[in-house]
Amino acid sequence: MPTRPRLSRSIPFWLLAAASVATAAAGAVILVDKLGVMTTTLTDGTATGVEVYVGQSVAGLGAVLLGAGIVGVLITLAVAAAATLRPHPPVEVVEPIDWSSDEVADAPADHGYERGLGYTSEIATAPRASDEQTEVAAAPSR
């Protein structure tokens, strides 16, 4: 089952977000600049045909870029909201543990003991006869 990366690691998502913000900013700069030039020259009475008629077209281009950038930002937000609604893939349990089973309750503690290898689970507490002789022989004489 293919998995999709998280949205925070998705390169196309961040490209859409960056391009939308850049387009909106560029459109706003063009629009504000041309409207400012047109307003200044028309109120001064020094406006030429190029500033008025070409300025209107360039201001229209700035308005279109600003609108496209805003729509792109809204699409980016919609994609981010839709990504939160996507269900996460279920975690598959390979083998469930049956805690009521007798095998689990009777299993010895994991101290290196494995059944079938010849070990015993009992600990010898009484010293062997050969150990007592070794201790006597190793003791210094007085």
Image (cartoon, helix red, strand yellow):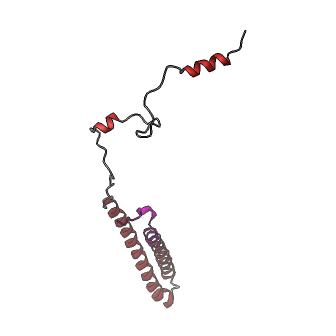
In the image, residue 43 lies at what x, y percent?
48, 79
Q: Residue pushed farthest top? A: 142
Q: Residue at x 47, y 88 (%)?
A: 54
Q: Work out whether residue 34 or residue 116 is closer to the camera in this orientation and state it.
A: 116
Taking 92 as reference, is 14 left or right? right
In the picture, the quarter occupied by the C terminus is top right
In the image, residue 76 lies at what x, y percent?
39, 68
In the image, residue 44 lies at what x, y percent?
52, 80
Q: Residue at x 57, y 22 (%)?
A: 130
Q: From the viewer's perspective, is residue 24 above or below residue 9?
A: below
Is residue 56 inside the magenta stretch?
no
Would you identify the image quadrant in which residue 5 lies? bottom left
Question: How many numbered tags mark residues here?
Answer: 0
Q: Residue at x 40, y 39 (%)?
A: 115
Taking 33 as reference, is 83 left or right? left
Q: Residue pushed farthest right? A: 142
Q: State the predominant SS element of the stretch in magenta.
A: helix
Q: Residue pushed farthest left? A: 100
In the image, residue 136 lies at what x, y percent?
64, 16
Q: From the viewer's perspective, is residue 19 above or below residue 51?
A: above
Q: From the viewer's perspective, is residue 114 above or below residue 12?
A: above
Magenta-drawn segment: 1-21
In the picture, the quarter occupied by the N terminus is bottom left
Q: Work out whether residue 52 or residue 28 is closer to the camera in this orientation and state it.
A: 28
Q: Work out whether residue 67 or residue 142 is closer to the camera in this orientation and state it.
A: 142
Taking 130 as reference, is 69 left or right? left
Q: Residue at x 37, y 72 (%)?
A: 71
Q: From the viewer's perspective, is residue 91 above or below residue 117?
A: below
